[in-house]
Image (tube, coloured by chain):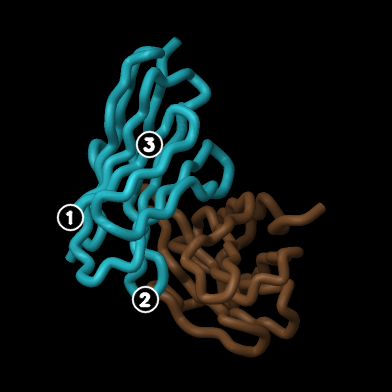
Amino acid sequence: EDQVTQSPEALRLQEGESSSLNCSYTVSGLRGLFWYRQDPGKGPEFLFTLYSAGEEKEKERLKATLTKKESFLHITAPKPEDSATYLCAVPRGKLTFGTGTRLTIIP
Amino acid sequence: DAGITQSPRYKITETGRQVTLMCHQTWSHSYMFWYRQDLGHGLRLIYYSAAADITDKGEVPDGYVVSRSKTENFPLTLESATRSQTSVYFCASAAGNSYEQYFGPGTRLTVT
């Protein structure tokens, strides 16, 4: 039973080409949805926490939004340094992570 | 430096050997966690600790042992390593009962 599903698995974009990553979840009584960034060879780095449907948070070129069933990570005019794997996670007991979206921004 | 550190960063060991991975954090976070990360499985929780001397199993605890005698340290021991334990291991910490976890740089373990 999947609790957290991320799509697509991989995404290649040209520099400046905006897009969105999806995180869908089936946990009832959501107590937060968490986004992390992971660079190759490093540990995940915390980005955002969203607690309620309709909530939005922004950081530089990233904006995270939340609905009752999914979250989107919007990337506006990305740069090569935005290339990373983006993970979402929900509390199910402790944090349960999705398998991530590997984002590549081509110069 | 403040933060969370792991050692060693890379380790190669043989099947059947005991190996201990170290984790140290300087934030005085009460919660600490051990994950393994494998292709196709993502991050899976092995063990976690709510405070010194309090530990609990996660999703994949078999073959692993943890202890936490001091708040800042949370070692993970593989008592008899198997090839299926080849993975990248991440330690994380969190304040109180917050779900916002902060991760170490990871240990890449290869069991031959």
The disc, 1 or 3, on the residue closer to the chain's N-terminal end is: 3
Q: Chain of mark 1?
A: A
The disc, 3 or 2, on the residue closer to the chain's N-terminal end is: 3
The CA distance from mark 3 to mark 2 is 27 Å
Q: Residues within 10 Å of mark 3 (few under 14, many from 20)?
A: some
Q: To which residue does mark 3 refer? A: A63
User: Which kind of residue does numbered mark 2 sit on?
Assistant: Gly
The CA distance from mark 1 to mark 2 is 19 Å
Q: To which residue does mark 2 refer? A: A93
Chain colored brown: B
Q: To which residue does mark 1 refer? A: A69
> SS of the residue at dot 2?
loop
Q: Position of residue A75 (x, y in %)?
A: 36, 28
Q: Chain of mark 2?
A: A
Residue at (38% x, 30% y) in the render: A103
Q: Is residue A72 left or right of residue B53?
A: left
Q: Chain of mark 3?
A: A
Residue at (50% x, 61% y) in the render: B100
